[in-house]
Amino acid sequence: MRPNQFSAETAQKLAEKLNMPIEHIVHTPPQVIMEKISELEKKEEEAGMEKNNR
């Protein structure tokens, strides 16, 4: 499998956001990265809703 074609800056931002090493970001299939981003956004949205309900 070919490595993802992310720029260095994009890979670094994804690594920080997903709390993964850059090497893993580059070699993780794109659909898995998109799934992880989606899960993270759902968690952030739920946390925001809980904060607003207080």
Image (spheres, helix red, strand yellow):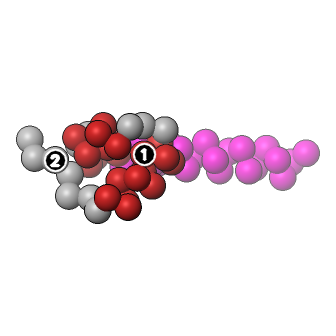
Residue 38 placement, left or right of 28: right
- Nearer the N terminus, badge 1 or badge 2? 2
Q: Which of the two residues, 36 or 15, is positioned nearer the viewer here?
A: 15
The residue tagged 1 is 15
Q: Is residue 37 magenta?
A: yes
Q: Residue furthest left?
A: 1
The residue tagged 2 is 3
- Give the main secondary structure of the magenta stretch: helix
Q: Which of the two residues, 14 or 35, is positioned nearer the viewer here?
A: 14
Amino acid of disc 1: Ala
Q: Is residue 38 magenta?
A: yes
* CA neighbours of label 2 inside 10 A, class few (<14), some (14 to 19), many (20+): few
Residue 12 image offset from top left, x and y in percent:
40, 52
Amino acid of disc 2: Pro
Q: Residue at x 57, y 46 (%)?
A: 42
Q: Which residues are magenta?
A: 34-54
Residue 26 placement, left or right of 33: left
